[in-house]
Image (spheres, rainbow, N blue to C red):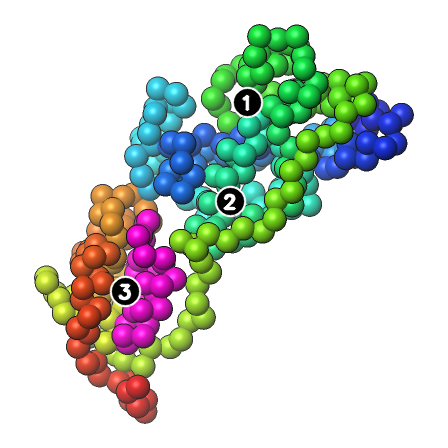
Amino acid sequence: MSLASAASDLSDLRDYAFEWALVDVETSGLVPRRDRVLSVAVVTLGADGEQTGEFSTLLNPGCDPGPVHVHGLTAERLRGAPAFEQVAGRIGALLEGRVLVAHNAQFDYDFLAHEFTRARLRLPVARRLCTLALNRRVDPPTDDLKLGTLAAHYGVPQLKAHDALDDTRVLAGVLRASLREAAQLDLPLPLVACPPRQDAQFAPKPPKTPCAFRNPGRLTAGGPLVQGMKVAVTGETRTARADLVLRGVAAGLNMMGSVSRHTSALVTNEPAANSAKARRAQAEGVPVIDESAFLRLLGDVRPGTAHEGTAAP
């Protein structure tokens, strides 16, 4: 039975006619602001309950993968996988215009929201549905409401727990069965509105202003910073990233969004991180300093040489 037919005689339950995007993430920890998504799977269903799309991938988080004994995702397995920002557009296209569905949806939603914001993108989710919350209303005769328990109750085969794609396929079966039960009980769906979010830690980049100074080259050990130096920032920072960029620009630095052989310095509090910027900095021999050193050096930025035809500010 499809989702549509399950609700066809319950015209007041119009929520049943939504398009759905079922999501599961495996993560390096439990704190979205600090930890990262290691794998993500999205399965889309039409309003009739039929699958319309599917996408899954491992992700290179640029950090320790955390509890390998839980998710089985070692650093070696994740090496060579794309960074989240490389697949964010594809994930966003699957989420756009659909209700996000997950088991304990707050968890998956929060992690996706932080990953999208790190990538300077908006998470295109207006509403979400938690199958855990839905089954609290349905109240099936089970010992608990874990995904595996519900799958067994509803007759949905589960091949590999804590595998994002298999969990999402299982979730599809649990959602279909749960909606049939909810329709029979005349239950409204526990939909949660998801207003646009903006974490100040990952605020949008300010408009790029051409630097008035020539690049004087690499930062030497101990400093100083010189106007025109190309500086990039990667990883978590105590100061909001946008504020660091604005302070660097105000001091006459050329704040960059990437690292190249022309980069003067990379600012990071995690020099051993496996981010793309950190890897490129290591490959190119770019000097690396932490946030506190950068802030200290910002207090005494030396004058640079203006580009020809440009007056120094």
Front one among 180 and 140: 140
Give the left or right position of residue 186, taking residue 102 as reference.
right
Q: Position of residue 108 (x, y in %)?
A: 52, 34
According to the picture, the residue beneath numbered tag 3 turns out to be 231
Q: Is residue 106 left or right of residue 292?
A: right
Residue drawn at the location 32% of the way across and 57% of the way down: 239
- Kind of element beneath mark 3: strand
Q: What residue type is labelled 1?
A: Asp
Image position of 259 (left or right of 187): left
- For the residue labelled by badge 2, is the local secondary structure a helix, a strand or a loop? helix
Q: Residue 34 at what x, y percent from top left?
A: 36, 41
Q: Which mark is residue 113?
A: 2
Looking at the picture, does residue 247 appear above or below residue 63? below
* Residue beneath the point at 74% across and 34% down: 46
Task: In the rendered view, tell whether residue 23 sits above or below residue 69.
Answer: below
* Residue depicted at x 27% and y 64%: 231
- Identify the residue position indicated by label 1 in the image: 166
